[in-house]
Amino acid sequence: MSSALLSVWDKSGLVELAQSLVGHGYRLFSSGGTGVTLGAAGVPYTEVSTYTGSPEMMDGRVKTLHPRIHGGLLGRRGLDDAVMAEHGIEPIDLLVVNLYPFEAMRERDLPLPELVEYIDIGGPAMIRAAAKNFRDVAVAVDPSQYPLVLAALERGGFTEEERLGLARAAFARTAAYDAAISNHLHGVAGSPTVYTRQWSNGRMLRYGENPHQQAAVYGAAGIAGAVPLQGREMSYNNYLDLDAAVGLVREFDDCAAVVVKHNNPCGAARGPGPLEAYVTAREVDPVSAYGGVVALNRPADLATATEIVSTFVEVLAAPDFEDGTLAVLAEKPNLRVVRMGPPVPGDEVRSIDGGVLVQRTLPFAEEWRVVTKRAPTPDEEDALRFGLRVVAHTRSNAIVFANARQALGIGAGQPNRVDSARIAVAKARQPLAGSAVASDAFLPFPDTLEVAAEAGATALVQPGGSIRDDEVIEAADRLGVAMVFTGVRHFRH
């Protein structure tokens, strides 16, 4: 008779799986909590403590840590049979375990003594034992694997490939679980000395940044988990640009649209509705917007969809799509259409030669201190705040000219700030008289300010902090430019 051990926190699909196992002649062993669910459904099972002869103890901390359990999981068929028989150990053919929800509970900011009670010990030990002995024991660690188990039951057993696949998933789960615990416990005191991360849902991409490079995307939520509702498969560059576009459009509470090309915004605007916001953003730099990635922070409507398909857009992202909108967008079958989910908080991780850099953005507040004799007018302040949001999502060195509803000129990614300012002026398609300017970092000399003022800007926002701040403030007063220091730098390398 085959046997299975069931011990799960997440009871989804448990009863159906157990009923099928019994129907296929399996004897079931179960831990206490899982057994309560099985018993309530009338599924016969043997309590683990009855089988081992050892009661659950220490509030459930010790229940499956027993030789009769681990011997049944680790025993090699045809090699350890005599030892197993001598010690009354039954072979366990299937292990179904999912773990205490440490990852979910740590998000609740529980006190550490309470949180550690959600660190599973017996579960990972059993999973690792079963996965090590995958030739003889199948192991399922998530309800999403139950259909595979049920299919194997129907045809009389697991294939070697299925067993190995389940073992891979099992070790990946315990590795991710241990990593979550390690990172959290280290994070209590600061950055961990050993940083471990795992992402699920890996999918190969056609290629990387260029066709000669291999690439994959990992992640089941946020931009990483985005799967187009229509259109071609997302590319490596699509994911990068979509992440940049969504990151910027989320900065705005009122209706806004953003266009990104090569990881830099080439258009950003507010509007009374998504159509007006999109058209205004696109017209900031229509040449660059061609083939760009568009993100809206309001549901896309029919009018916006009609405008989108009138030109070439690679990706459109919105929180939702009104009735009939997707049918209009389907006129462009290669257009990737993505529904934006909520943001997924987490560290920013970037690879470098031999390792990674990890960055964590803690809550911060801009100081917003007027340093010139003239304070910005309300309209200028609105424009400064708009430009500041855009410049924070533009590659450094970055300068953005803006009014209260749209970016006017964007200069990005230059080795010096003056060139960024000149590029922003050159790219502007509207007069810059009365515009506001945002700089992602302090102005080390008055020259950038002078370029901005010559173009017609009347207000400027920057973090401040240069040893020549006094010179720049003096120049601003001389030129009649209202200037604000925020105390927060927005470098984006």
Image (spheres, rainbow, N blue to C red):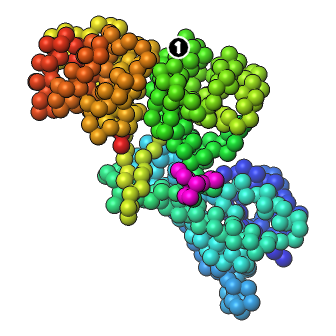
From what the image shows, is residue 383 above or below residue 127?
Answer: above
Residue 7 rendering spot, x and y as whole percentages: 67, 61
Residue at point 70%, 51% (across, down): 11
Q: Looking at the image, which residue is at 46% across and 31% down?
A: 265
The residue sitting at 65% across, 69% down in the picture is 167
Q: Residues within 10 Å of mark 1 (few under 14, many from 20)?
A: some
Q: Can you say which quadrant of the picture contains the N terminus?
A: bottom right
Confirm whether the magenta stretch covers residue 87: no
Quarter in which the C terminus is drawn: top left
**In this rendering, does residue 52 appear at all?**
no
For the stretch drawn in magenta, the main secondary structure is: loop
Left or right of residue 117: residue 489: left
The percent coordinates of residue 461 (x first, y second) are 27, 22
Image point 69% across, 72% down: which residue? 164
Give whichever of 255, 175 is nearer the camera: 255
User: In the picture provided, is 177 more to the left or to the right than 304?
Assistant: left
Left or right of residue 253: residue 299: right
Residue numbers of the magenta segment: 205-213
* Position of residue 215 measured from the top left corner of the image (x, y, whole percent): 57, 56
Which of the two residues, 163 or 109, is positioned nearer the viewer here? 163
Name the foreground residue: 58 vs 75.
75
Which residue has dot 1 on it? 271
| Res 406 quadrant in image | top left
